[in-house]
Amino acid sequence: MDDAALLEAVAEGNQDAMAAVFDRYSRIVYCIALRVLREPGLAEDVMQEVLLMVWKRPQSFVSQRGNLAAWLSVVTRNRAIDVLRKRSPLQPIDDMPLPDPRDMTIASDQGWMLDKVRAVLVQLPAEQQGPLELAYFQGLSHTEIAAKTGSPLGTVKTRIRAGLTTIRKAMGA
Amino acid sequence: MKNNVHIAETDFALYAMGVLSADEMAQARAHLAGCARCAEDLRQTTLALAAYAQSTPEVEAPAGAKQRFMARVAQIADQPDAAAPKIAPARVESKSPKRAIGWSWALAGTLALLLLAVGVDDFRKRAEIGPLVAEAQRGQIDSAQLNQLMELLTSNSAQKVSLHETAPAARQPEGRVIYAAHSGKLLLTASNLHPLPAGKIYELWILQPGGKKPLPAGTFAPDSNGNAAMILADEPANLAVAGFGVTVENAGGADTPTPPIVLSGQ
């Protein structure tokens, strides 16, 4: 059963369908949350919160035909970063943009495409991997990354951009 | 980063990750509201970030996680109020049924829950919506209306504007607007509004740059506690918005704002 059919069933209150959604996406949601938070308990909390959003409002996905895997991935990362920031009173909680489900229409959950992304990430220069990891999975600003790495602000931005450009090229190749 | 200057390539990723400064985030959001080119670049960046997130090696969720999750699902399913969010009847008066959805949501519990669910933690005035529900009659929320709201709240290009009284006052009326330019959806919440004289109504205006004529966005009346909320589904899309204003008009609304502007923001 594809995502659309599953979500139709979820929208009808079918708990078995929701269990199937859990089976399909809980691992990727959990591992993203864990990569950010590094605490299994907190990661599970975020996983539950994100997946419960699907149970509470499946209509959003049914009607908008977005890519559920991609949307869940971005939302999970954002929620995990939010939790991370709340635990550190010195870091303000900034606006956290969330993707519009309709924007996530690319089939980014296709294994072959992710394999290509993983392949280019392995070969990504360390000076690009580092800032990208710090910004995305630790939620550090470019200013904080510059202070942490000793690199100029502009260089940090350029390296993050270059890393993402490489990923985009891999997705389009 | 000004509204009429495209977002720097190096800033797209930082914006999508939410790691720009608050000012930079606001400026980028304001620009994205009216720039299709940057919105598309942001979309591509977001997709790349999604792929980056998904490239994380998968690990199994902790033992018992599914049972705990399904228990929560069952718990919600057993609570009709939680499973099917309730809303209150409309308090907003709209000049045209076609322009507004035709209701204002006394969103309290529902909206507070949704805001938490979608992570809109910057929505500081969440509490002002609460009293609306307390006094509202309960009713089944329409799924299409819920979708409209969720689309607006989760849009990463929606413009959020706080409105403040133009002259100091003890009660300090204030409001907040979220406007998604790409879809033309708009959410207004307000609190501490002064009671209106008989035959009068509050009206929201979209202020355009360059001295263009303000566009009427909808009319609304506060409840007995001075709170109001309304969502409008088909405001003009892709507007270059300089700000928002609220005036007091005759019931039925006006085509041009009548001074003074009692609330404004940009």
Image (tube, rainbow, N blue to C red):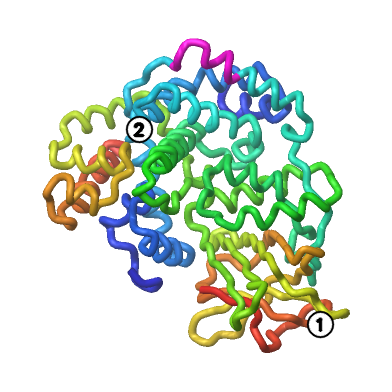
| Left-right relation of A1 to A85 | right
Residue farthest toward the front in the current orientation of the protein: B170
Badge 2: chain ID? A
Q: Looking at the image, which is closer to me, B179 or A116?
A: B179
Which quarter of the rendered picture does the N terminus of chain B lie within?
A: bottom left
Which residue is pictured at 54% across the width and 63% down the height? Answer: B181
**Residue A36, disc:** 2
| Left-right relation of B177 to B228 | left
Element type at mark 2:
helix
Q: Is residue B253 magenta?
A: no
Residue farthest toward the top in the current orientation of the protein: B63
Residue span colored magenta: B61-69
**Residue B223, disc:** none
Q: Looking at the image, which is closer to me, A107 or B131?
A: B131
Residue A115 in the image: above or below residue B147: above
Element type at mark 1:
strand
Crowd band around label 1 with a 10 angstrom C-alpha radius: few (<14), some (14–19), many (20+): some
Callout 1 amino acid: Asn
Q: Position of residue B50 (x, y in %)?
A: 39, 37
Q: Which residue is labeled 1 in the image? A: B250
